[in-house]
Image (cartoon, rainbow, N blue to C red):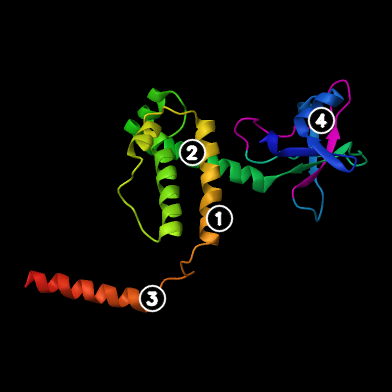
Amino acid sequence: MLDFCYVTQGAGAVAAEKWLGRQGLDAARCGLAKVPHLTDLYALFVDRSADAGLGYRGLVRDAEASNDVQLSAVPKGEEPVAYLSFNRNGYSTYCRVYREYWDWVARRNAERYQNTVQHGKNYDAKNMLHVFRLLQMAEEIALHGQLLVRRPNREFLLQIRRGEFEYEALVSQAEELVKRVEAAFADSPLPDEPDRRAVEQLLIQTRREFYAGRQ
């Protein structure tokens, strides 16, 4: 959680742990008090007495498990040495993404994961295969107005799935392909939207022929 705490410094801010290191301060000797009317901003006090007699409680109760900063009772008349901001929203987002990642790990397709481990390139080869397949089909739709399901470069796609290419090279090719797709659609004679009436009539005709054949 301390990774999301920052101490004001001039017109900017520095990570709390880095600030403490620069000042030669022990977090256990620090105390925080809320700043009225300002969300997640705290006055930071330091107990410089020889026996730590002010009893400050530190910045957090447990650096690994805490979900909030820890406040201390500050004697009247003490002056803060700085102000600390806790990026609560950033920390909450981080925790959510962290939980979602481990949920994914628990539910992931074990066979697919093993395939990623085996080819040793550290990327999801099946996912990368589909990236190229879909981008190429999109370019064909823009250029020719047709959906070609059977791929003429099947072997290339299978090479991707087998992990025969480096990740950076594939990403570079995919980015170039994205540019080509965007350019193709910019010049394509295809309408921006489908003819909804024509699509509806085609659906009706298809259903009539289908059910007529089942009678």
Does residue 25 appear in the picture of this structure? no
Q: Is residue 85 left or right of residue 202?
A: right
Q: Residues within 10 Å of mark 2 (few under 14, many from 20)?
A: few
* Magenta-drawn stretch contains 204: no
Identify the residue position indicated by label 3 in the image. Answer: 196
Identify the residue position indicated by label 2 in the image. Answer: 101
Real-space Cα distance between discs 4 and 2? 31 Å
Residue 209 in the image: above or below residue 173: below
Identify the residue position indicated by label 4 in the image. Answer: 19
**Residue range highlighted in magenta:** 40-66
Q: Amino acid at mark 3?
A: Arg
Give the structural element (helix, strand or loop) at label 2.
helix
Q: Residues within 10 Å of mark 3 (few under 14, many from 20)?
A: few
Disc tally is 4
> Based on the displayed image, in which of its 4 quarters is residue 28 positioned?
top right
Q: Amino acid at mark 4?
A: Trp
Quadrant location of the C terminus in the rendered image: bottom left
Identify the residue position indicated by label 1 in the image. Answer: 183
Does residue 91 appear in the picture of this structure? yes
